[in-house]
């Protein structure tokens, strides 16, 4: 009998790649607000359900919680901030309640977060032991999200502090490709802010590593061991696409266009995957040049 997985956020970038990797060896139930849409997108590899239709988790071995309104899609109005928070916090509250009520508990609970939990940190090297978070919205969202996940009782809980996930068909990189292909890409402001990133294959392999290793618990930075500044990243992407890099995008322009959410690209964290590497995980793409070369862009 295959191990059973309950997955939220299955139609998102990470979820889709994760399902493709898990489906040969695991029975997967995907939680979705629109099961019919999830079925169309994901096919027969999964069983889609709404969250409120789940009565218990007694038959679930692994719970993976990736649900959340995209944080950088829209300006952060008060209503949008509420959607960002509620989509993460409410789902996590429900999953934790179901885990705590289960007679046969899942053996592992893996829940999402982001390196944004640290807030802006300049060029300070940041591993999972760092606790001096900068007080801003992205940190508040993630810190509360993590706290709620860690309220699960008697289950091994792992937190994914994810950086920018590099994939050709979604996420931040997909949004960057068009201007760079047109030769209109450029560094953002000074370009000195760090952009912690991870290749999608390492992201998925890292989650599988957490599933299979019972000694893994707590927060993990899901980032390359070689984080780069925005300027370095922009140069590497321009070279990969064989395009020039002439431009600088001023901070004032971004702030006018994006409002407070521009903080996500104007500031960063030099996040390092210390715990993941200490548990024996080996990155397939530790260097940015190789990660970009491996993508079909």
Image: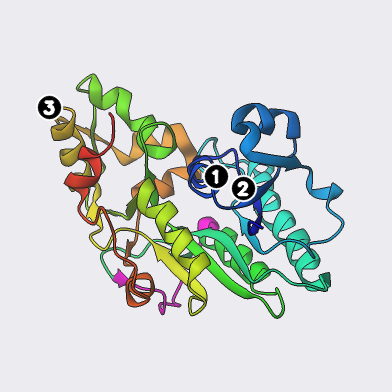
Q: Which element carries disc 1, helix, strand or loop? A: helix
Quadrant of residue 1 within the rendered picture: bottom right
Q: Is residue 209 left or right of residue 146?
A: left
Q: Which element carries disc 2, helix, strand or loop? A: loop
Q: Is residue 134 something one can see in this rendering?
A: no
Of the 4 image quadrants, the one containing the C terminus is top left
Position of residue 170 measured from the top left corner of the image (x, y, whole percent): 44, 34
Q: Is residue 40 left or right of residue 210?
A: right
Foreground residue among 188 and 111: 111
Q: Which element carries disc 3, helix, strand or loop? A: loop
Position of residue 148 measured from the top left corner of the image (x, y, whole percent): 68, 68
The span from disc 1 to disc 2 (Cα, nearest Å) is 17 Å
The span from disc 2 to disc 3 (Cα, nearest Å) is 35 Å
Q: In this picture, which residue range is highlighted in magenta? A: 125-138
Quadrant of residue 144 within the rendered picture: bottom right
Residue picked out by circle 1: 19
Position of residue 55 measured from the top left corner of the image (x, y, whole percent): 87, 56
Q: Which mark is residue 101?
A: none
Tell me which numbered mark, 2 or 3, is placed earlier along the sequence: 2
Looking at the picture, the colour scheme in use is: rainbow
Tell me which numbered mark, 1 or 2, is placed earlier along the sequence: 1
């Amino acid at each position: 009998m295959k191990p059973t997985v309950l997955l939220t956020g299955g139609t998102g970038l990470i979820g889709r790649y994760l399902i493709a990797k898990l489906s040969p060896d695991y029975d997967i139930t995907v939680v979705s607000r629109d099961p019919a849409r999830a079925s169309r997108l994901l096919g027969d590899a999964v069983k889609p359900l709404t969250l409120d239709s789940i009565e218990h988790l007694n038959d679930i071995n692994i719970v993976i919680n990736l649900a959340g309104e995209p944080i950088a899609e829209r300006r952060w109005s008060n209503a949008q901030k509420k959607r960002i928070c509620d989509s993460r916090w409410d789902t996590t509250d429900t999953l934790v309640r179901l885990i705590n009520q289960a007679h046969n508990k899942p053996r592992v609970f893996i829940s999402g977060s982001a390196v944004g939990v640290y807030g802006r940190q300049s060029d300070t090297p940041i591993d999972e032991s760092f606790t001096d978070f900068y007080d801003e919205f992205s940190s508040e969202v993630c810190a509360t999200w993590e706290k709620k996940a860690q309220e699960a009782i008697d289950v091994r809980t792992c937190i994914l502090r994810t950086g920018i996930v590099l994939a050709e068909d979604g996420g931040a990189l997909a949004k960057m490709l068009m201007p760079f292909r047109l030769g209109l890409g450029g560094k953002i402001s000074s370009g000195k802010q760090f952009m912690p990133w991870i290749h999608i294959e390492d992201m998925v392999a890292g989650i599988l590593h957490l599933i299979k290793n019972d000694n893994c618990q707590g927060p993990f930075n899901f980032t390359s061991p070689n984080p780069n500044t925005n300027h370095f990243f922009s140069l590497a992407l321009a070279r990969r696409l064989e395009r020039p890099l002439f431009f600088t995008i001023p901070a004032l322009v971004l702030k006018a266009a994006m409002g407070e959410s521009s903080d996500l690209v104007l500031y960063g964290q030099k996040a390092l995957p210390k715990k993941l590497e200490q548990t024996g995980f080996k990155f397939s793409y530790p260097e940015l040049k190789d990660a970009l070369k491996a993508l079909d862009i």
